């Protein structure tokens, strides 16, 4: 996978995380995880289980309204 493809996947995943963070951060954890999974599937990108767990934990920390959306560190195109 080229750096360009990897960067495009990270950017697509970041857009999903930003959207889920802005609209769903106060929702139940299961709803946030579902919305994240659906968004990533629509964007045709995937993230590792560890990356997903970190992002979900950081979204949960946003409930104090002092934190910003988590940053995606790695993602890959589906397929």
Image (cartoon, grey):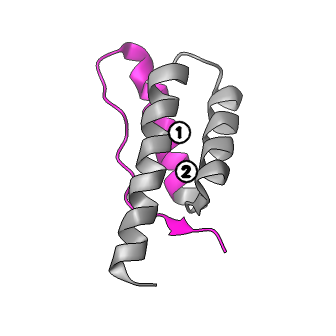
Region rendered in magenta = 51-79
As displayed, is residue 66 above or below residue 14?
above
Q: Is residue 67 left or right of residue 41?
A: left
Q: Is residue 74 visible?
A: no
Q: Is residue 60 visible?
A: yes
Q: Label 2: which residue?
A: 52
Residue 70 on image: x %, y %: 37, 40
In the structure shown, which secondary structural element does the residue marked by tag 1 occupy?
helix
Q: CA distance from mark 2 to mark 1?
A: 6 Å
Q: Quadrant of residue 15?
A: top left
Q: Answer whether residue 72 is magenta in the image.
A: yes
Q: Is residue 31 left or right of residue 64?
A: right
Q: Quadrant of residue 2?
A: bottom left
Count neighbours of disc 2 (C-alpha within 10 A) and say few if under 14, some if 14 to 19, many if 20 or more. some
Q: Is residue 43 left or right of residue 1?
A: right
Residue 46 on image: x %, y %: 59, 61
In the structure shown, which secondary structural element does the residue marked by tag 2 occupy?
helix
Residue 28 on image: x %, y %: 65, 20
As displayed, is residue 66 above or below residue 78?
above
Q: Label 1: which residue?
A: 56
Count neighbours of disc 1 (C-alpha within 10 A) and say few if under 14, some if 14 to 19, many if 20 or more. many
């Amino acid at each position: 996978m080229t750096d360009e493809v990897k960067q495009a996947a990270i950017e697509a995943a970041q857009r999903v995380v930003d959207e889920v963070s802005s609209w769903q951060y106060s929702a139940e954890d299961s709803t946030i995880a579902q919305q994240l999974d659906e968004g990533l599937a629509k964007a045709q990108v995937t993230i590792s289980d560890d990356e997903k767990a970190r992002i979900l934990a950081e979204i949960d920390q946003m409930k104090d309204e002092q934190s910003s959306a988590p940053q995606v560190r790695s993602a890959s195109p589906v397929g």
